Amino acid sequence: QVQFVESGGGSVQAGGSLRLSCVASEDTYNNHCMGWFRQTPGKEREGVASINDFGQPTYTDSTKGRFTISEDNASNTLYLQMNSLNPGDTAIYYCAVYTRLRRICPEKQVDNGGWVGWGQGTQVTVSA
C-alpha cells in the first residue's frame, strides 16, 4: 500500500509562511485525488485542501486564500504552501490519497476511510 512521507513543518510566528512537501512511495495513485489534513490533540483529523487529477484545488473555509495546494506527478510529490499563518493552524499535517474515486475528489474532505497512505505527519507550530 502506498505510504507518504511529509516534511517541511516547523515553528513560525503568526503571519509567517511554510511549505510542506509529501512524497509518495509509489505512483499507483497518480490519477487520484490528493489531500492535506491536519490534526490537533483530542480532535479528529480535518481536511485542509485537496486537488483532483485535473489540477483543480479545493480548500476549506479556514484555509481559502492563505494556502495553496499543488502537485508534481513526475516526482510523486504533493505540496502545501501556507501563508499568513496563525496560531489556529498549529497541528500535525498529513497527506493522503482518496482511493474510492478516480480523478475527482469527494464532495467533502472527511477522513471516512477512503483516504489512505497516512505517514508520520509533520508538525507545524505557529506562535502569536
Image (tube, rainbow, N blue to C red):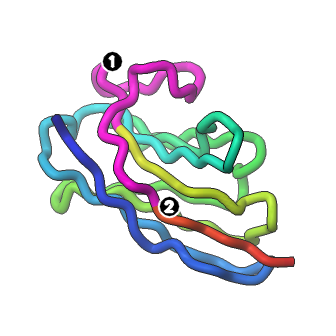
> Which structural element holds mark 1?
loop
Amino acid at pointer 1: Leu
Placement of 24 over or under 21, stated as above or below: above
Is 25 positioned to the left or the right of 77 in the image? left
Disc 2 to disc 1, C-alpha distance: 22 Å
> Which structural element holds mark 2?
strand
* Residue 54 makes an appearance in the image: no
Amino acid at pointer 2: Leu
Mark 2 Cα-neighbour bin, 10 Å: few <14, some 14–19, many ≥20: many
Q: Nearer the viewer, residue 13 or 101?
A: 13
Residue projecting furthest to the right: 128
Q: Residue 101 carries which label?
A: 1
In reply to whether residue 106 is colored magenta, the answer given is: yes
Residue visible at 76% across and 41% down? 61
Mark 1 Cα-neighbour bin, 10 Å: few <14, some 14–19, many ≥20: few
Q: Please report the bounds of the magenta region as a residue range.
A: 97-121
Is 18 positioned to the left or the right of 8 in the image? right
| The C terminus sits in image quarter | bottom right
Q: Residue 80 carries which label?
A: 2
* Residue 104 makes an appearance in the image: yes
Is 80 positioned to the left or the right of 15 in the image? left
